[in-house]
Amino acid sequence: IVSIQINPEKIGEIIGPKGKTIRAIQEESGATIDIDDSGLVKIAAVSGEAGARAREMIEAIV
């Protein structure tokens, strides 16, 4: 599990309309992503590569 802190104002951008963006990140990377209201993003993945890919995709948005 990898955790990163983002600006809480950016949470909506990661989730996207009706969850479209976060679902796409999860499907493409193979990781599971959980975001809490404080902006803490938790990325869980079977492989380090999947976790790194999800993190890169999130960081590209924020």
Image (spheres, rainbow, N blue to C red):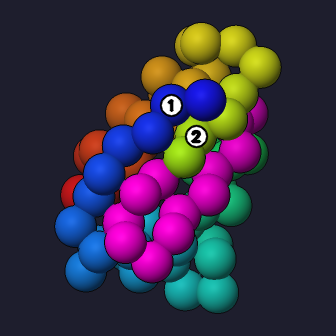
Q: Is residue 34 above or below residue 3?
A: below
Residue lying at 68% horizontally and 61% vertically, measured from the top left: 23
Residue lying at 67% horizontally and 35% vertically, measured from the top left: 44
Disc 2 and disc 1: Cα gap in Å? 5 Å
Question: Furthest-front residue in view?
Answer: 38
Badge 1 marks a residue whose secondary structure is: strand
Q: Which residues are magenta?
A: 29-41
Asked whether disc 2 touches disc 1, contact meaning CB atoms under 8 Å apart, the reply is yes
The answer to whether residue 20 of the structure is visible from this angle is yes
Residue that carries the numbered disc 1 in the rendered image: 2
Left/right of residue 41 with respect to residue 45 in the rendered view: left
Q: Picture coordinates of residue 21 (x, y %)?
A: 55, 66
Q: Is residue 3 magenta?
A: no
Question: Furthest-top residue in view?
Answer: 48
Q: Is residue 33 above or below residue 18?
A: above
Q: Which numbered disc flags the more N-terminal residue, 2 or 1?
A: 1
Badge 2 marks a residue whose secondary structure is: strand
